[in-house]
Amino acid sequence: MTVLAACWLLFGSAFLSATLLPGSSEAVLLGLLAGGTGQPALLVTAASLGNIAGATVNWGMGRYILIFKDRSWFPIKDATNARAQAWFARYGIWSLLLSWVPIIGDPLTLMAGIMRVSIGPFLIFVAVGKVLRYALIVLAWQYWPA
């Protein structure tokens, strides 16, 4: 596999992993590292950009999702939405540093859209969390005793 193909594969995996769809970009990253495909900094960049882009899709969906709240098929109950908004209001934009955490990260980025967090601060906080996560994975892989 070429380095370019590996980066696109990792970008796509990270993108899907950051949306509400299931995925594991960490496994793809570790597989590429183990296979010696691409420089670690390039792989961290591809994974981070894909993951940030996916989180931004969640943010965008959050901006408009509540227009459907009165539809019978709408998956978020009013009580659940109210609890999530109260939690986000309590911890604020700083909670986006946890957007990389499995299970809670994707809903956090969706809630940021619902709560009308501006795109600039959203991108900064999400990027910090996601880049650090991938960088720590690479560092752990490089320095973990074999």
Image (cartoon, rainbow, N blue to C red):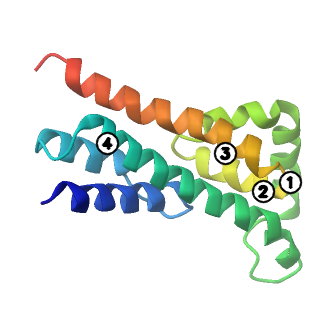
Q: Which is more toward the observer, 139 or 81?
A: 139
Question: Circle 1 sits in a helix, a strand or a loop, which is it?
Answer: loop
Disc ID at residue 42: 4
Residue 28 x/y as whole percent:
27, 50
Q: Is residue 81 left or right of residue 127?
A: right
Residue 52 x/y as whole percent:
55, 50
**Circle 1 is placed at which residue position?**
116
Do tag 2 and tag 1 residues touch (Cβ < 8 Å)? yes
Residue 85 x/y as whole percent:
86, 48
Mark 4 or mark 2, earlier in chain:
4
Amino acid marked by disc 1: Arg
Mark 1 or mark 4, earlier in chain:
4
State the separation of the CA atoms marked 1 and 3.
13 Å
Classify the position of the C terminus by image quarter. Answer: top left
Q: Which is more toward the observer, 12 or 120?
A: 120
State the separation of the CA atoms marked 1 and 4.
32 Å
Instruction: Estimate how packed mark 1 is, as few (under 14), some (14 to 19) or many (20 or more) residues with alpha carbons within 10 Å.
Output: some
Question: Circle 2 sits in a helix, a strand or a loop, which is it?
Answer: helix
Tell us which disc is closer to us: 4 or 2.
4
**Circle 2 is placed at which residue position?**
113
Question: Circle 3 sits in a helix, a strand or a loop, which is it?
Answer: helix
